[in-house]
Every structure is written in C-alpha cells, then in structure tokens.
Image: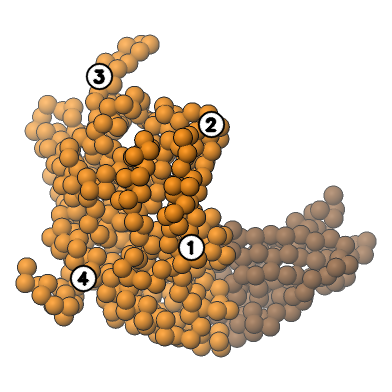
Chain colours: A orange, B brown
Amino acid sequence: MQFWTSKYSFVILVAHMRSDFPLLQKQPELVYLDSAATSLKPQPVLDAMNEYYTGFSANIHRGLYDLSERATVAYEGARETVREFINAKQAHEIIFTRGTTEAINGLAQSWGRQFVREGDEILTTVLEHHSNLVPWQMLAREKKCALKHIDVNDDGTLREEQFLKLLSRQTRLLTITHVSNALGTIVPLRKIIQQAHAAGIKVLVDAAQSAPHMPLDVQYLDADFVVFSGHKMCGPTGIGVLYMKERVQEKLELPWHFGGGMIKEVHLKKSTFQKAPNKFEAGTPPIAEAIGLAAAMRYLQSIGMNKIRDHEKQLLHYALKTLGAIDGVQLYGPNNPAMQSGVLSFGIEGIHPHDIAEILNEDNIAVRAGHHCCMPLMERLNLPATVRASFYLYNTEQDIDRLAAGLRNVKKIFKS
Amino acid sequence: MNLYRELIIDLYKNPVNKRSMPDAHITNSGANVTCGDRVRIYIKKDSEKITDLSFEGEGCAISIAAASLLTEEAKGVLLNDISDWGPHNIFEWLGTELGPARIKCGLLALETLQEAVKKIKQ
C-alpha cells in the first residue's frame, strides 16, 4: 500500500480511518484516550455481528439445517482467523473464552489444580494486572504453594536479572505480562521464556495489552499459554482468546467448565470429553462475538500491526515531548517509545489524578485515573494513583495537543 | 455544573482543621482504595457532644474540601445528631451535588466520622 510511504501519508490514513468508527463520527469533539481499558469499535465489526444476528443466528455444532451449518462455519472460520493473526500452528490451539480474565482463572483452576502441588512455586511479576495475580493467589492458598514476584526498576522496567535468582526446583509456572497496562512497559519475553523452558517451567503470557497494539507471533514467543481479550482490539466485549500449545493441551485432563458441547458420552455417573478446542468451550459460546473478533482482526490486519505499532510509537514520542514540556507534569514509566507501548501514566504535582481526569472530562477528554488494577505496582512505585492516557490507531497528534491544553487548564483551575 | 468552584480549590490548597491531635479522645481512619483517598479523623468530646475535631489525610480536592467543611460543621454538634447526616449535608456545604463517580470522595470523611461516633457509643 502506497499509503505508508511517509509519516504525512499515515496522517491522511488515520483521518480516513476515523470515519470507520461510528462513535468518533457521532462525537467529533471526543478525545478518546482510554483504549487500554477498551477500544472503540469500527463499523465492519458491528456489521459482521449484525449479519450473524439478522442472517444466520442459529446455534453451532448441533443443528442439521443450513442456518446452523452456516453459523458453525463462521464460528470455526473465526478460530482460523485468530490462528492466523497470532501465527499459531493449529486452529485447535485457539480456545475462545469470555476474555483474558476467564482464561487466566480457567488455567489456574484446571492446569493449576492438575500440575501444582504443595510446596511448589509460581513465579510472576509486580507489573501484573490483578487478573493475573489474584487467581494465582487463590491457587496458592488452596495448594499451599508459594507465589514469588520479579521486581521492577523505578522506571517500571522489569528487573530481568531477578528471574534466574527466583527460579528454583519447585517453580512450576512463570505467569507474566507482555505489556504493562499501567505504565506501557514492554517486557522482553523471548529470552526469559527460553530460560524458563530450559528449566522445565511452563509460561503463561498475558497479552491483553500487546495483541491489540503490536505483531504477536506465538510460535516465535514460544509461550505455552497466551491470553488476550477481544474488546481491547476493536472487537466486541465478552470474547477472549486462550492459546494453548498442542503438547500442553494433550496433558491437561480436565477443563474448568463442564456442560453441553464439550462431552463425548454422558452416563448417569460418568462422562467422557471431546478433544480441544471443544473440550474447553462448554455451553453455547459467544458466537456473534467470535465472528466480531475475527472481523476486528481482519480490520487490524488490513492496516498492518507493524504500522499500528509505529503509529503509537510516534504518538508516544510526541506525547512525551508535549506533556514533558508542561511545568509540574511528572511522567512515569520507561519514557522510551522503543520499550513502551502507547500508554502514558502521569501526574501533576499537588493535584490528585481524579481531579485531573474529572476536569479533562469537562473538555471532552477521556482518560483513566486510579491504580489501573495494579495496586502492588502502585505500592512498589509509591504512587497512590496516576492519570493514564492510552493511544490506538485512531488517535492523532491533535488529540495529544488537546490533552496538553486540558492539562494547562487543570493547572489554571488549581492555580498551580 | 462547575465542580471545581473557588471554595473547593481553596479548601484543598489551604485546608482547615488539617492537623493531628495527640490528645484526641478517639481517632478513626477510612480510605477509598480505588481512588487512593485516605483520611484520619481526631475527635475530642464531652459526655454528649463533639468539642473539637481535626483530620489528616491525602486525596482529591473533593475529599479534602469535604473533610475541611465537615470538621468545621461538626464542632459542638451532639454525637447523636452526627448519624443523621448524609450526602445532602455534604452537597450543601460544598455548594454542589456529586455524581456517582465522585460521591465516595465527598462522603469519605463523613462516613469515617460516623464510624468513630458508633465506636464511642459502643
């Protein structure tokens, strides 16, 4: 595509692309800087879901009639789209879940129950979102095993050298985020995963903040489990992905949900189960949402994940420069576009983040303020809360200019 | 609606009654964990009413301004009357209503005071 020949032509494309997002069309004054919480949805995603609901909204796998067959083909087609998007080897390595949270809880309750024993250790980091911490705390309590945490530096980068120190004969799992939702830190995972595998340890990667924003190749990464959500990547809510390596799937005896769609034979006292992925998808799955997620992935691919990453890098670079020039603004995190996604946490000296967010809202600027579901990280960095602006493909440098103007207004109101 | 009225900003920057009280008869702490607001209330009392009170804490402008106003208004008030206070009192003192996102900030000091009064009665 000749669109990508220069930064200027990218700006033209973003302007064009913004017309794909009905919410931006309805509210042209909105500066939406909360895509790390959830992204806006483009029309092709809504159309794909609408087509299912209005054209072939039958249940999958069971009906012997045309509509059901069409729904089954679309649902399994969505699985193939996901496989291709993350470059998994096999489509059955893709399991649809309700989201990242269900995927992690499900693994703690199935894989964790089967493979973790008393005295074992699970290794994680202080960067994690609560959803990649609390399920393991619960497992640790049940199994009487230990949870250990790799620390961060003050700039929010991982202290990688701690990994090998914390590793022990008892370690069973490393569960680690790919990108910090609070600070945007990109964690260099490949070497750590190689080291974990050399020590015979399984690895779970929380890709909720990376899958939407940069190329994700699960074979290159070589993690055993990779999880992410649809709604942060232009897809609908209520759907997520659990990638599980075939070899790991084969050894996992039981899923975390049981019911229809996942059984082979049921007797009054005993049942047998299907193979993956059906085994892990009890009940009627989110069919429309899977179709919507596939449409979202095709939409992102039509732009190109490398281009999206480059765009966010440029936006972050511009934001660091623009916000950094405002007196009293403190920027947290790596402050380096090479190792940071399009997420920028900041504060203004003497003004509480909630007040900042509320005043920005009066200017139609949507940001998040709080602990971002990362209380241990906030405690580690000695911050009660931060303001977080997060970017996506539809954001522009003008959005950042509006944010900067909004912050100057906050300072004016607070006379600081 | 302008939430950030002069009064609120002034009370945030120059809070009243914001000090510790080593000879307080009772103290109580409260927090809004999601926001990072924390408050500690100090109370001096006689048999039936509050004779003096102060607070310490950190938080947003709303929570600090509300704590300042509350500690002014509650001086000399009967312990029994404190439990009758509610959101409308806070709104009246702040001169503005608070939406669902900020009401917790506005009520933190009041709820912490009410808990303290409960402790006294027990």
Give the class, few, some or many, for how many residues have Cα within 10 Å of label 4's Cα (few <14, many ≥20): some
Determine which quarter of the picture holds residue A308. Answer: bottom left
Report the mark closest to the observer, 2 or 3: 2
Q: Chain of mark 1?
A: A
Residue labelled with disc 3: A264
List x then y, in percent, for residue A206.
36, 49
Q: Chain of mark 2?
A: A
Instruction: Assign a secondary structure to mark 4.
Output: helix
Q: Nearer the viewer, residue B95 or B36?
A: B36
Tell me which residue sits at (36%, 81%) in the image. A321
Please determine if labels 2 and 3 lie on a single subunit: yes
Residue labelled with disc 2: A119
List x then y, in percent, for residue A336.
36, 71
Report the mark closest to the observer, 2 or 4: 2
Tell me which amino acid carries mark 1. Answer: Asn
Give the class, few, some or many, for how many residues have Cα within 10 Å of label 3's Cα (few <14, many ≥20): few
Tell me which residue sits at (33%, 27%) in the image. A252
| Residue A386 appears in the rendering | yes
Tell me which residue sits at (35%, 45%) in the image. A195
Give the class, few, some or many, for how many residues have Cα within 10 Å of label 1's Cα (few <14, many ≥20): few
Q: Chain of mark 3?
A: A
Report the mark closest to the observer, 1 or 3: 1
In the shown orientation, is residue A380 left or right of residue A326?
A: right
In the shown orientation, is residue A125 left or right of residue B24?
A: left
Label whose residue precedes the other's in the sequence (1 or 2): 2
Label whose residue precedes the other's in the sequence (2 or 3): 2
Tell me which amino acid carries mark 3. Answer: Lys
